[in-house]
Image: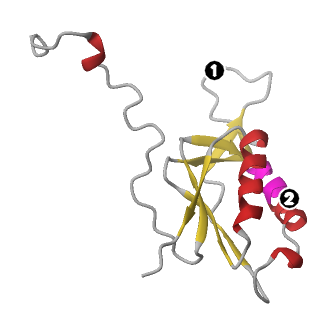
Amino acid sequence: MRFNKLTSIEQVSFKGRNRRKVKKVNLIYGNIGFVILQNIQFEYAYFYLIKKYLKYFFKFKYALGNYFKIWIFLKGNYPVSKKSKNSRMGKGKGAFNRWIIKLNQGHTIMEFSNINIIRLKKLNKYWSKMLKFNLLLVKKIKM
């Protein structure tokens, strides 16, 4: 047996080993960004709610300078189809119904520049409750 020298089952278990561990995040455009801590999927309609909420949440008075920018890296990447109720087996895949966004752990959702970090922490707390997935606020290191 391969694990014969181990004394307990906990030493063999591999579950939860890389939990809440994001390897290396590269922020391309902004200096602050949101990174996902788990694999998620949500409907593309939620993207419009996020966009609408961002317009409400960020007004010009919360910017640090004369301007601020937001980059969003979300797109519908998984089509979902649905058959009609009366269709039989083997009659095809069905008609297109909606898009779903599937994202892996460590994916950067948004990047910001010239926005108050306290305001972003409040946004992170609100989204964790509303969308039911954990986000990590990452800041770019200046060299």
Task: Identify the mark at residue 53; answer none if there is no mark.
Answer: 2
Residue located 54% across and 41% down the image:
39
**What colour scheme has been applied to the protein in the rendered image?**
secondary structure
Queried whether the magenta region covers residue 49, the answer comes back as yes
> Do the CB atoms of the residues marked 2 and 1 lie less than 8 Å apart?
no
> Sequence order check: which comes first, mark 2 or mark 1?
2
Q: Between marks 2 and 1, how big is the CA–CA gap?
A: 42 Å
Residue located 37% across and 32% down the image:
17
Q: Is residue 137 left or right of residue 64?
A: left
Which residue is tagged 1? 89
Of 3 and 107, which appears nearest the observer?
Answer: 3
Point out the residue furthest to the front here: 118
Q: Quadrant of residue 10?
A: top left
Secondary-structure class at tag 1 = loop
Secondary-structure class at tag 2 = helix
Point out the residue furthest to the bottom here: 66
Stretch in magenta: 44-50
Q: Quick one: label 2, few (<14), some, or many (20+) residues within 10 Å?
A: few
**Residue flagged by tag 1: what amino acid is it?**
Met
- Magenta part, dominant SS: helix
Q: Quadrant of residue 72?
A: bottom right
Residue located 58% across and 75% down the image:
31
**Residue flagged by tag 2: what amino acid is it?**
Tyr
Queried whether the magenta region covers residue 10, the answer comes back as no
Residue located 71% across and 52% down the image:
124
Q: Is residue 12 visible?
A: no
Compared with residue 105, is residue 32 higher up or lower down, i.e. above or below?
below
Q: Position of residue 131 (x, y in %)?
A: 74, 42
